[in-house]
Image (tube, helix red, strand yellow):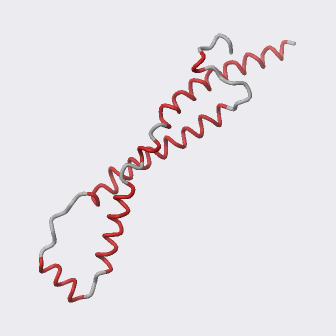
Amino acid sequence: FSNVPWPVRPTPGINYDFVALMYLGGSALAAFFFVLERYILAPLLVEQSPPNSTTDSTIASNGDTAGAQDGEQWKEFARGMEGMYVVFVPFAPCLIWSLVVRYFWIKETKILEEEKKKK
């Protein structure tokens, strides 16, 4: 590996298939949480107009507060998940780096295998 630049030089004994797979998993989590926040939970994060008094009195007279509590729980969940994708975003550049290192690792492994076959 001496002819490979040091930032992407593979270390002997490390399986870069596994490393790339783990970074792919982290990047997939970042994408999942981003989509979850932007497209599914976003409507819950938007402040809606304050409820009018007739709706409040209807809920109070019917005793149907379970639906309102459920909605509040989902809003609290949405607020808790806000920005969660940022935790996993660093996996994306690491994935790119690991794929470059993996390329050199596979290339060097094939060269070593061909040399063994010749001997």
Q: Nearer the viewer, residue 117 or 107?
A: 107
Measured from the top left, where is residue 19 in percent x and y? Answer: 62, 35
Q: How many marks?
A: 0
Residue shown at 60%/38% (left/top)? 21
Location of residue 83 with respect to 22 vertically, above or below: below
Q: Residue furthest left?
A: 53
Q: Is residue 62 left or right of residue 66?
A: left
Q: Quadrant of the C terminus?
A: top right
Q: Splitting the image into 4 quarters, where does residue 51 fall?
A: bottom left
Measured from the top left, where is residue 41 in percent x and y? Answer: 33, 57
Q: Nearer the viewer, residue 21 or 69?
A: 69
Measured from the top left, where is residue 69 in percent x and y? Answer: 32, 75
Q: Splitting the image into 4 quarters, where does residue 79 fall?
A: bottom left
Q: Quadrant of the N terminus?
A: top right
Location of residue 77 with respect to 67 vertically, above or below: above
Location of residue 88 with respect to 57 vertically, above or below: above
Q: Splitting the image into 4 quarters, where does residue 55 fall?
A: bottom left
Q: Residue furthest right?
A: 119
Q: Is residue 80 left or right of residue 49?
A: right
Measured from the top left, where is residue 109 in percent x and y? Answer: 72, 21
